[in-house]
Image: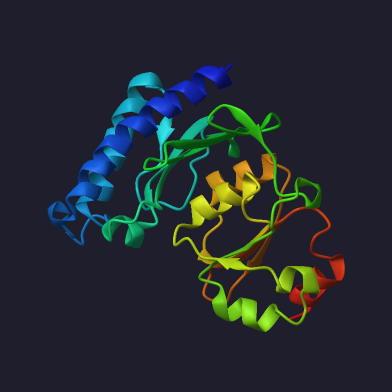
Amino acid sequence: MLNSHACLRNMQTALRLGAKRALAFHDRPDRIMFPGKNGWMSSAHEDIYQTMFASLIQAYPDHHIVPQGDKAIPQEAYVWAIEPIDGFDNFLSGIGLFTLSLLLYVNGKPTISAIYAPVTDELFSASLGSGAQLNGKKIRIWSSKSGSTPCLGLHNANSIFSILQDKMPKAVACMPQRQLGCFTLSVAYHASGRLACLLGNGFTKHSIAAAHLIAQESGSVGRFFNQEDGSVFCIFSPPGLLTKSFYHQLQDD
């Protein structure tokens, strides 16, 4: 049986090793090459992925690691998915809002995940059924009882938000908006109570599975709507913030 605490330690090791490579590129973006082959977006993606891959395979030589760019999850007991950089435009521009993430599927189910923001040294993690954490401390989604100002996060969803604005509860539609340029970080911020609600667009469920697990374990409700191009539009919110009638209207549309 897999030890979840040991697994999280090994994930943290792999993420921090990958982060060292990421920060080396972040300081010198002129070193990044764009080969345009073998499924790699850039040499930075490949370098970080291989660094994290080597760390994981050393800790778990019998586990399967999904090749970069693959969307299908093999039907094996333990399968790892690596996201070397999310928020690449920020990364390339020298903006510190980017992340590295890892997800472990156990018998096909997302079970343990971690998202690391190197510039702020924030490690968000979750184990299925055991809650979500930030740097080892339990986190929960935004609550009206917290006293903090609620904010709405958007990622590639400006046009959708404009369409949905009149259907949303007024309290949500009038929230100040934040756009971070990194979806996994946006979800992690939502999970830790910094964003009350989050709308994201243009993803596959596989690509956001690590972030989804952290949001789910923090108490968030994630809803997904398939787009005609095969991508997914998603909404994360606290239970009850968005009404059932609102979601019914989305499904009817």
Q: As rendered, which of 105 and 245 lies closer to the eye? A: 245
- Which picture quadrant has residue 162? bottom right
- Which picture quadrant has residue 49? top left
The residue that appears at 26% across and 54% down in the rendered structure is 40
Side of 182 relative to 129 (left or right): left
Q: Is residue 57 above or below residue 114?
A: above
Find residue 158 and report its horizontal and vertical position in percent: 55, 76
Find residue 194 and report its horizontal and vertical position in percent: 62, 51
Q: As rendered, which of 152 and 160 lies closer to the eye? A: 152
Can residue 103 be seen here? The reply is no
Q: Is residue 149 above or below residue 55?
A: below
Find residue 20 and report its horizontal and vertical position in percent: 27, 35
The residue that appears at 74% across and 75% down in the rendered structure is 250
For the N terminus, which image quadrant? top right
Find residue 161 and report its horizontal and vertical position in percent: 63, 76
- Which picture quadrant has residue 248? bottom right
Q: As rendered, which of 155 and 107 lies closer to the eye? A: 155
The residue that appears at 52% across and 75% down in the rendered structure is 229
Can residue 100 be seen here? The reply is yes
Q: How many numbered discs, if any?
A: 0
